[in-house]
Image (cartoon, rainbow, N blue to C red):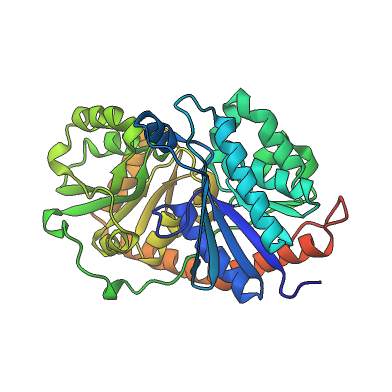
């Protein structure tokens, strides 16, 4: 038997890639390394717009697997071959699966673990089943909030869930939806929140657009797209009767750009809006001390790192009662909660905080207390230790006890 156990996480991104999934996978990889595992991360996508553009430009290539080491973690970035301008999805996926199989033959993984069930889950679970390996699938949010409505993906998602040795979720809401969709996971699944690495905000550089912030700053952080509910935040800010800036730390996704340009123009708030554009995580964190009210009006959102970072920065939070946002924030205690799609409720909550700095301060302090006490690194690491212990010790058994969280 090998010592230590060798595990392979599969994900759509990993630092220096920008994105919440990459941040989480890096954090979890370091947890597992500290627990004594040899950790590999295979990075790949299951959608291929870049490859299609390269093919159209006449740039062809062989299948590639680039391996490097980052903080003691072995990272494999897999790119499919580009052989044709009319290649189909299965042509690319075949190459990725071949590279995954080759990695397993080389390193002899003891466990494989996929993040995002619709993108990496199927290939990872197939590798596990063909090689008699235990497999963990981690549902992060959009995989069950959006892709479950695509009839072409439903059977694949169900098969992946049903064939997982264990499935983890970042909110109870997500776990309940998955258990309805695939009841076979009832006794082999658990839900626990992300944690957050402590940040010394005083050590961060002054962000570049601070001089444009006027009055009370209402801010939101993220990769702004359909699920973020930003149109309802625009509605909520239209009739505020005090000087304010609406700060968007991040950018709007390219495929929805025309829609968001229309929404911003129709809001009548263009002279009050500041958009940073795509920036590094460090610079995004540096804006948090300048925000007075942190708005996260998501329609669905898993367990967003941006929420935890805002709590760590002692911000007064207005969020929607969805997923982990509604499970972490206690309305009136460490933030304010409203229903999704409800501009009026959002407007009332923001107005309640606008001219009450002491209330903002109280909510912010309790938010920080919550995140430090209940969403710290040690708690999440302990949860992952329990999951891996169960999967490795009972991988030959079809039923497992539910992990306590």
Observer-nearest of 342 and 55: 55
For residue 314, above or below residue 396:
below
For residue 319, above or below residue 209:
above
Q: Quarter of the image holding residue 386?
A: bottom right
Residue 35, percent across and down? 65, 74
Residue 2, percent across and down? 77, 72
Residue 121, percent across and down? 64, 44
Q: How many labels, in total? A: 0
Query: Would you say 116 lies left or right of 233 here?
Result: right
For residue 222, say whether it is visible: yes
Residue 167, percent across and down? 70, 50
Residue plotted at (23% across, 31% down): 261
Residue plotted at (71% across, 47% down): 127
Observer-nearest of 76 and 240: 76
Q: Quadrant of the C terminus?
A: bottom right
Q: Quadrant of the N terminus?
A: bottom right
Residue plotted at (16% across, 59% down): 208
């Amino acid at each position: 038997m090998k010592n230590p156990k060798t595990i392979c996480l599969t994900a759509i991104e990993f630092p220096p890639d920008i994105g919440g999934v990459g941040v989480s996978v890096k954090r979890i990889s370091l947890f597992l390394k500290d627990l004594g595992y040899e950790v590999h991360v295979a990075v790949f996508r299951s959608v291929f717009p870049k490859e299609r553009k390269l093919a159209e430009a006449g740039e062809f290539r062989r299948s590639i697997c680039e391996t490097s080491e980052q903080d003691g973690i072995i990272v494999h970035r897999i790119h499919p071959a580009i052989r044709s301008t009319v290649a189909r999805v299965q042509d690319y996926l075949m190459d990725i699966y071949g590279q995954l199989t080759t990695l397993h033959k080389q390193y002899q993984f003891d466990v494989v673990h996929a993040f995002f069930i619709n993108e990496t889950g199927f290939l990872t679970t197939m590798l596990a089943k063909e090689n008699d390996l235990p497999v963990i699938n981690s549902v992060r949010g959009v995989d069950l909030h959006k892709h479950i409505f695509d009839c072409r993906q439903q059977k694949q998602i169900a098969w992946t869930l049903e064939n997982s040795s264990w499935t983890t979720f970042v909110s109870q809401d997500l776990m309940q939806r998955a258990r309805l969709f695939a009841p076979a996971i009832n006794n082999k699944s658990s839900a626990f929140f992300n944690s957050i690495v402590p940040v010394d905000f005083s050590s961060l550089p002054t962000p570049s657009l601070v001089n444009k912030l006027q009055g009370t700053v209402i801010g939101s952080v993220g990769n702004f797209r359909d699920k973020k509910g930003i149109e309802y935040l625009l509605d909520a800010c239209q009739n505020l009767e005090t000087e304010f800036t609406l700060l968007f730390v991040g950018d709007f996704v390219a495929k929805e750009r025309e829609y968001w340009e229309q929404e911003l123009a129709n809001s009548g708030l263009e002279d009050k809006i500041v958009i940073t554009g795509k920036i590094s995580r460090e610079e995004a964190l540096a804006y948090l001390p300048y925000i007075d009210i942190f708005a996260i009006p998501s329609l669905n959102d898993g367990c967003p790192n941006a929420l935890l970072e805002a709590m760590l920065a002692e911000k007064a939070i207005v969020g929607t009662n969805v997923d982990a946002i509604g499970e972490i924030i206690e309305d009136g205690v460490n933030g304010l909660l409203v229903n999704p799609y409800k501009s009026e409720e959002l407007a009332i909550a923001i107005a309640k905080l606008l001219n009450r700095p002491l209330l903002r301060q109280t909510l912010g302090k309790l938010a920080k207390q919550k995140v430090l006490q209940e969403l710290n690194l040690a708690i999440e690491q302990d949860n992952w230790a329990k999951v891996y212990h169960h999967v490795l010790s009972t991988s030959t058994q079809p039923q497992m006890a539910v992990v306590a969280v």
